[in-house]
Amino acid sequence: MHTQPLLSLVLPFYNAQDFLQPLLESIDPQLSPEVQLVLVADGPTDDSLLLAQQFIRLSQKGSCYMLLQQANAGVSVARNFGIAQSTGQYIGFVDADDLLLPGYTEQVLQLIRKEQPDLIELGYQRFSQPPQLSAAKARFLHTRAGWLPLPAALSEVAQVNQWFPWLRIYRRQAVPDFQFPAGIGFCEDMMAVPQLYLSCQSLYHLRQPLYGYRVHGASASYQVSPDQKLQLQQFFRQLDNGLMPQLPVRARQLMLLHLAYWLYNWQLQQPKADAETGRLAADIRQLACQLWWCPGFSWRKKWRLWRCMSVFQQQFPA
Protein backbone atom coordinates (compact mmCIF):
# COMPACT_ATOMS: atom_id res chain seq x y z
CA MET A 1 0.00 0.00 0.00
CA HIS A 2 1.45 3.36 -1.06
CA THR A 3 1.52 6.04 1.62
CA GLN A 4 2.43 9.70 1.35
CA PRO A 5 5.92 10.34 2.75
CA LEU A 6 6.23 12.61 5.73
CA LEU A 7 9.39 14.25 4.39
CA SER A 8 10.65 15.07 0.89
CA LEU A 9 14.26 16.21 0.49
CA VAL A 10 14.88 18.22 -2.68
CA LEU A 11 18.38 17.81 -4.13
CA PRO A 12 19.23 19.84 -7.27
CA PHE A 13 22.52 19.09 -8.99
CA TYR A 14 24.47 20.38 -11.96
CA ASN A 15 28.06 19.15 -12.48
CA ALA A 16 28.42 17.34 -9.17
CA GLN A 17 30.18 14.09 -10.11
CA ASP A 18 32.96 14.70 -7.57
CA PHE A 19 30.55 14.99 -4.64
CA LEU A 20 27.32 13.18 -5.48
CA GLN A 21 28.42 9.63 -4.59
CA PRO A 22 29.38 10.34 -0.95
CA LEU A 23 26.26 12.48 -0.53
CA LEU A 24 23.95 9.71 -1.75
CA GLU A 25 25.80 7.22 0.44
CA SER A 26 25.04 9.46 3.44
CA ILE A 27 21.34 9.71 2.51
CA ASP A 28 20.48 6.19 1.32
CA PRO A 29 20.64 4.46 4.75
CA GLN A 30 18.29 7.12 6.12
CA LEU A 31 15.57 6.66 3.49
CA SER A 32 12.32 4.86 4.21
CA PRO A 33 8.72 4.94 2.98
CA GLU A 34 8.39 8.08 5.12
CA VAL A 35 11.37 9.85 3.48
CA GLN A 36 11.54 10.69 -0.21
CA LEU A 37 14.64 12.00 -2.01
CA VAL A 38 13.85 14.15 -5.06
CA LEU A 39 16.90 14.63 -7.28
CA VAL A 40 16.71 17.29 -9.99
CA ALA A 41 19.36 17.07 -12.73
CA ASP A 42 19.79 20.66 -13.91
CA GLY A 43 21.20 19.87 -17.35
CA PRO A 44 24.59 18.56 -16.16
CA THR A 45 27.37 18.15 -18.72
CA ASP A 46 29.49 15.75 -16.66
CA ASP A 47 28.68 12.19 -15.49
CA SER A 48 26.65 13.20 -12.44
CA LEU A 49 23.30 12.20 -14.00
CA LEU A 50 24.68 8.78 -14.96
CA LEU A 51 26.08 8.40 -11.45
CA ALA A 52 22.68 9.20 -9.92
CA GLN A 53 20.90 6.76 -12.22
CA GLN A 54 23.34 3.96 -11.40
CA PHE A 55 23.14 4.63 -7.67
CA ILE A 56 19.34 4.52 -7.66
CA ARG A 57 19.30 1.35 -9.75
CA LEU A 58 21.59 -0.44 -7.29
CA SER A 59 19.89 0.87 -4.15
CA GLN A 60 17.57 -1.44 -2.25
CA LYS A 61 15.42 1.62 -1.57
CA GLY A 62 14.81 2.65 -5.17
CA SER A 63 11.14 3.40 -4.50
CA CYS A 64 12.20 6.20 -2.15
CA TYR A 65 13.88 8.12 -4.99
CA MET A 66 12.43 10.46 -7.60
CA LEU A 67 14.85 11.51 -10.36
CA LEU A 68 13.83 14.52 -12.46
CA GLN A 69 15.61 16.15 -15.39
CA GLN A 70 15.45 19.63 -16.87
CA ALA A 71 17.46 21.78 -19.26
CA ASN A 72 19.98 23.86 -17.36
CA ALA A 73 18.04 26.70 -15.73
CA GLY A 74 19.82 27.27 -12.43
CA VAL A 75 19.42 26.13 -8.85
CA SER A 76 16.28 28.18 -8.13
CA VAL A 77 14.29 26.69 -11.01
CA ALA A 78 15.60 23.22 -10.15
CA ARG A 79 14.50 23.55 -6.52
CA ASN A 80 11.08 24.83 -7.60
CA PHE A 81 10.69 21.86 -9.96
CA GLY A 82 11.59 19.49 -7.14
CA ILE A 83 9.15 21.13 -4.74
CA ALA A 84 6.33 20.91 -7.28
CA GLN A 85 6.92 17.21 -8.00
CA SER A 86 7.62 16.09 -4.45
CA THR A 87 4.85 14.45 -2.43
CA GLY A 88 5.98 14.80 1.19
CA GLN A 89 4.03 16.66 3.85
CA TYR A 90 7.28 18.42 4.80
CA ILE A 91 9.97 19.69 2.45
CA GLY A 92 13.68 20.07 3.11
CA PHE A 93 16.68 20.81 0.93
CA VAL A 94 20.09 19.30 0.28
CA ASP A 95 23.00 20.76 -1.71
CA ALA A 96 24.86 18.37 -4.00
CA ASP A 97 28.31 18.89 -2.44
CA ASP A 98 27.25 18.37 1.17
CA LEU A 99 26.42 15.40 3.43
CA LEU A 100 23.58 14.33 5.69
CA LEU A 101 24.91 13.49 9.13
CA PRO A 102 23.75 10.32 10.91
CA GLY A 103 20.42 10.72 12.65
CA TYR A 104 19.10 13.44 10.33
CA THR A 105 15.89 11.73 9.25
CA GLU A 106 15.37 9.95 12.58
CA GLN A 107 15.46 13.20 14.56
CA VAL A 108 13.40 15.15 12.03
CA LEU A 109 10.68 12.50 11.72
CA GLN A 110 10.47 12.13 15.49
CA LEU A 111 9.95 15.89 15.83
CA ILE A 112 7.35 15.99 13.05
CA ARG A 113 5.32 13.16 14.59
CA LYS A 114 5.43 14.65 18.08
CA GLU A 115 5.13 18.41 17.51
CA GLN A 116 4.11 19.07 13.87
CA PRO A 117 5.73 22.52 13.62
CA ASP A 118 5.29 24.61 10.50
CA LEU A 119 9.03 25.33 10.30
CA ILE A 120 12.03 23.39 11.62
CA GLU A 121 15.59 24.70 11.92
CA LEU A 122 18.63 22.39 12.10
CA GLY A 123 22.21 22.61 13.29
CA TYR A 124 25.20 21.82 11.10
CA GLN A 125 28.95 21.25 10.90
CA ARG A 126 31.38 22.71 8.37
CA PHE A 127 34.03 20.63 6.62
CA SER A 128 36.21 20.56 3.54
CA GLN A 129 37.04 16.83 3.75
CA PRO A 130 34.73 14.27 5.44
CA PRO A 131 37.30 13.11 8.06
CA GLN A 132 37.13 16.63 9.53
CA LEU A 133 33.52 16.14 10.59
CA SER A 134 34.40 14.12 13.69
CA ALA A 135 36.06 17.18 15.24
CA ALA A 136 34.07 19.94 13.53
CA LYS A 137 32.32 22.53 15.64
CA ALA A 138 28.54 22.28 15.88
CA ARG A 139 26.90 25.49 14.61
CA PHE A 140 23.40 26.77 15.30
CA LEU A 141 21.19 29.70 14.36
CA HIS A 142 20.13 30.38 17.95
CA THR A 143 21.37 29.76 21.47
CA ARG A 144 18.03 28.26 22.53
CA ALA A 145 16.41 24.98 21.50
CA GLY A 146 12.72 24.23 21.11
CA TRP A 147 9.85 26.56 20.26
CA LEU A 148 10.88 30.08 19.31
CA PRO A 149 8.84 33.21 18.51
CA LEU A 150 9.04 33.74 14.76
CA PRO A 151 9.70 37.52 14.60
CA ALA A 152 12.57 37.34 17.10
CA ALA A 153 14.00 34.24 15.42
CA LEU A 154 13.89 35.94 12.03
CA SER A 155 15.85 38.90 13.39
CA GLU A 156 18.44 36.56 14.90
CA VAL A 157 18.81 34.79 11.54
CA ALA A 158 19.25 38.17 9.85
CA GLN A 159 21.99 39.01 12.34
CA VAL A 160 24.04 35.87 11.62
CA ASN A 161 23.04 36.17 7.94
CA GLN A 162 22.57 32.45 7.38
CA TRP A 163 19.77 31.80 4.90
CA PHE A 164 20.89 28.37 3.65
CA PRO A 165 17.77 26.46 2.54
CA TRP A 166 19.22 23.20 3.89
CA LEU A 167 19.01 24.60 7.44
CA ARG A 168 15.21 24.53 7.25
CA ILE A 169 12.37 22.08 6.74
CA TYR A 170 8.88 23.47 6.26
CA ARG A 171 5.35 22.06 6.25
CA ARG A 172 3.95 22.21 2.73
CA GLN A 173 0.44 23.11 3.88
CA ALA A 174 1.77 26.12 5.80
CA VAL A 175 3.52 27.65 2.75
CA PRO A 176 1.91 26.00 -0.29
CA ASP A 177 3.22 28.56 -2.80
CA PHE A 178 6.82 28.80 -1.58
CA GLN A 179 9.34 29.23 -4.41
CA PHE A 180 12.83 30.51 -5.07
CA PRO A 181 13.22 33.46 -7.48
CA ALA A 182 13.81 32.11 -10.99
CA GLY A 183 16.90 33.31 -12.79
CA ILE A 184 18.75 34.22 -9.59
CA GLY A 185 21.99 32.33 -9.01
CA PHE A 186 23.40 34.08 -5.94
CA CYS A 187 21.66 35.00 -2.67
CA GLU A 188 18.45 33.41 -3.95
CA ASP A 189 18.15 31.98 -0.43
CA MET A 190 18.10 35.44 1.20
CA MET A 191 15.42 36.49 -1.27
CA ALA A 192 13.23 33.45 -0.57
CA VAL A 193 13.79 31.99 2.90
CA PRO A 194 12.45 34.98 4.91
CA GLN A 195 9.04 34.19 3.42
CA LEU A 196 9.02 30.90 5.34
CA TYR A 197 9.33 32.81 8.62
CA LEU A 198 6.67 35.31 7.55
CA SER A 199 4.16 32.66 6.41
CA CYS A 200 4.56 29.99 9.09
CA GLN A 201 2.77 30.06 12.44
CA SER A 202 5.21 27.98 14.51
CA LEU A 203 8.97 27.39 14.60
CA TYR A 204 10.95 24.67 16.34
CA HIS A 205 14.73 24.96 16.60
CA LEU A 206 16.16 21.43 16.59
CA ARG A 207 19.50 22.29 18.14
CA GLN A 208 21.45 19.29 16.89
CA PRO A 209 24.11 19.16 14.14
CA LEU A 210 22.41 17.04 11.47
CA TYR A 211 23.85 18.47 8.25
CA GLY A 212 27.40 18.59 6.89
CA TYR A 213 28.19 21.77 4.94
CA ARG A 214 31.18 21.41 2.62
CA VAL A 215 33.32 24.53 2.10
CA HIS A 216 35.42 24.62 -1.05
CA GLY A 217 36.54 27.02 -3.75
CA ALA A 218 33.93 25.86 -6.26
CA SER A 219 31.02 26.78 -3.97
CA ALA A 220 28.51 29.22 -5.43
CA SER A 221 29.45 31.73 -2.71
CA TYR A 222 32.82 32.20 -4.37
CA GLN A 223 31.50 32.55 -7.94
CA VAL A 224 29.80 35.91 -8.43
CA SER A 225 29.20 37.25 -11.93
CA PRO A 226 28.49 40.89 -12.92
CA ASP A 227 24.86 39.95 -13.65
CA GLN A 228 24.51 38.46 -10.18
CA LYS A 229 25.90 41.64 -8.62
CA LEU A 230 23.34 43.66 -10.55
CA GLN A 231 20.56 41.35 -9.32
CA LEU A 232 21.77 41.87 -5.77
CA GLN A 233 21.80 45.65 -6.22
CA GLN A 234 18.20 45.50 -7.42
CA PHE A 235 17.20 43.36 -4.43
CA PHE A 236 19.01 45.79 -2.10
CA ARG A 237 16.98 48.72 -3.44
CA GLN A 238 13.71 46.77 -3.42
CA LEU A 239 14.25 45.73 0.20
CA ASP A 240 15.12 49.33 1.13
CA ASN A 241 11.88 50.46 -0.53
CA GLY A 242 9.61 48.14 1.44
CA LEU A 243 9.77 44.71 -0.19
CA MET A 244 8.32 42.06 2.17
CA PRO A 245 6.44 44.62 4.30
CA GLN A 246 5.83 42.10 7.12
CA LEU A 247 9.55 41.91 7.91
CA PRO A 248 10.43 43.00 11.46
CA VAL A 249 12.22 46.35 11.36
CA ARG A 250 15.43 45.00 12.86
CA ALA A 251 15.53 42.06 10.43
CA ARG A 252 15.17 44.43 7.48
CA GLN A 253 17.90 46.71 8.79
CA LEU A 254 20.34 43.85 9.30
CA MET A 255 19.59 42.35 5.88
CA LEU A 256 20.22 45.73 4.25
CA LEU A 257 23.51 46.18 6.09
CA HIS A 258 24.75 42.73 5.08
CA LEU A 259 23.74 43.33 1.46
CA ALA A 260 25.45 46.71 1.47
CA TYR A 261 28.64 45.22 2.87
CA TRP A 262 28.73 42.53 0.15
CA LEU A 263 28.12 45.09 -2.58
CA TYR A 264 30.73 47.45 -1.18
CA ASN A 265 33.44 44.78 -1.03
CA TRP A 266 32.67 43.47 -4.50
CA GLN A 267 32.89 46.99 -5.87
CA LEU A 268 36.34 47.40 -4.34
CA GLN A 269 37.52 44.07 -5.76
CA GLN A 270 36.29 44.72 -9.30
CA PRO A 271 35.80 48.48 -9.62
CA LYS A 272 33.97 49.96 -12.56
CA ALA A 273 33.69 53.69 -13.01
CA ASP A 274 30.12 54.49 -14.03
CA ALA A 275 27.07 56.38 -12.81
CA GLU A 276 25.70 53.28 -11.10
CA THR A 277 28.81 53.09 -8.93
CA GLY A 278 28.21 56.59 -7.60
CA ARG A 279 24.52 56.00 -6.97
CA LEU A 280 25.24 52.77 -5.15
CA ALA A 281 27.92 54.41 -3.02
CA ALA A 282 25.54 57.21 -2.06
CA ASP A 283 22.81 54.72 -1.14
CA ILE A 284 25.17 52.64 0.98
CA ARG A 285 26.64 55.62 2.81
CA GLN A 286 23.15 56.98 3.54
CA LEU A 287 22.08 53.58 4.84
CA ALA A 288 25.13 53.40 7.12
CA CYS A 289 24.27 56.81 8.55
CA GLN A 290 20.63 55.88 9.13
CA LEU A 291 21.43 52.55 10.77
CA TRP A 292 24.53 53.59 12.72
CA TRP A 293 22.94 52.53 16.02
CA CYS A 294 21.37 49.30 14.72
CA PRO A 295 22.55 46.50 17.07
CA GLY A 296 23.91 43.21 15.80
CA PHE A 297 26.16 44.55 13.04
CA SER A 298 29.81 45.32 13.78
CA TRP A 299 31.02 48.90 14.17
CA ARG A 300 33.98 48.13 11.90
CA LYS A 301 31.70 47.18 9.03
CA LYS A 302 29.45 50.20 9.60
CA TRP A 303 32.49 52.48 9.49
CA ARG A 304 33.67 50.94 6.24
CA LEU A 305 30.23 51.41 4.70
CA TRP A 306 30.07 55.04 5.85
CA ARG A 307 33.44 55.71 4.20
CA CYS A 308 32.47 54.09 0.89
CA MET A 309 31.44 57.35 -0.78
CA SER A 310 34.86 58.96 -0.34
CA VAL A 311 36.64 55.72 -1.30
CA PHE A 312 34.73 55.44 -4.57
CA GLN A 313 35.27 59.14 -5.31
CA GLN A 314 39.02 58.69 -4.89
CA GLN A 315 39.01 55.69 -7.22
CA PHE A 316 36.83 57.31 -9.84
CA PRO A 317 37.49 61.08 -9.89
CA ALA A 318 35.18 63.06 -12.13
Image (spheres, rainbow, N blue to C red):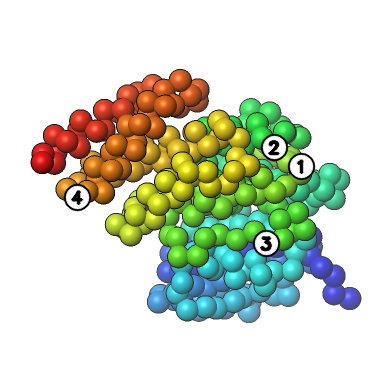
Q: Are marks 3 and 4 in contact (CB under 8 Å)?
A: no
> Please, what is the three-letter code of the amino acid marked with disc 2?
Leu
**Is 9 or 191 nearer to us in this picture?**
191
- The tag earlier along the polypeptide, 3 or 2, is 2
Judged from the image, the secondary structure of the residue bearing numbered disc 1 is loop
Q: Nearer the viewer, mark 3 or mark 4?
A: 4
Q: Which residue is mark 3?
A: 177
- The tag earlier along the polypeptide, 3 or 4, is 3
- The tag earlier along the polypeptide, 4 or 1, is 1
Judged from the image, the secondary structure of the residue bearing numbered disc 3 is loop
Q: Is residue 51 above or below residue 7?
A: below
Q: Quadrant of residue 285?
A: top left
Q: Residues within 10 Å of mark 3 (few under 14, many from 20)?
A: few
Q: Nearer the viewer, mark 4 or mark 2?
A: 4
> Please, what is the three-letter code of the amino acid marked with disc 1?
Ser
Residue 104 visible in the shown view: no
Q: Are marks 1 and 2 in contact (CB under 8 Å)?
A: yes
Q: Which residue is mark 4?
A: 274
Q: CA distance from mark 3 to mark 4?
A: 39 Å
Judged from the image, the secondary structure of the residue bearing numbered disc 4 is loop
Q: Which residue is mark 2?
A: 150
Q: Residue at x 43, y 34 (%)?
A: 257
Q: Are marks 4 and 1 in contact (CB under 8 Å)?
A: no
Q: Which residue is mark 1?
A: 202
Q: Residues within 10 Å of mark 4 (few under 14, many from 20)?
A: few
Residue 46 shown left or right of residue 83 in the figure: left
Q: Residues within 10 Å of mark 1 (few under 14, many from 20)?
A: some
Q: CA distance from mark 1 to mark 3?
A: 17 Å
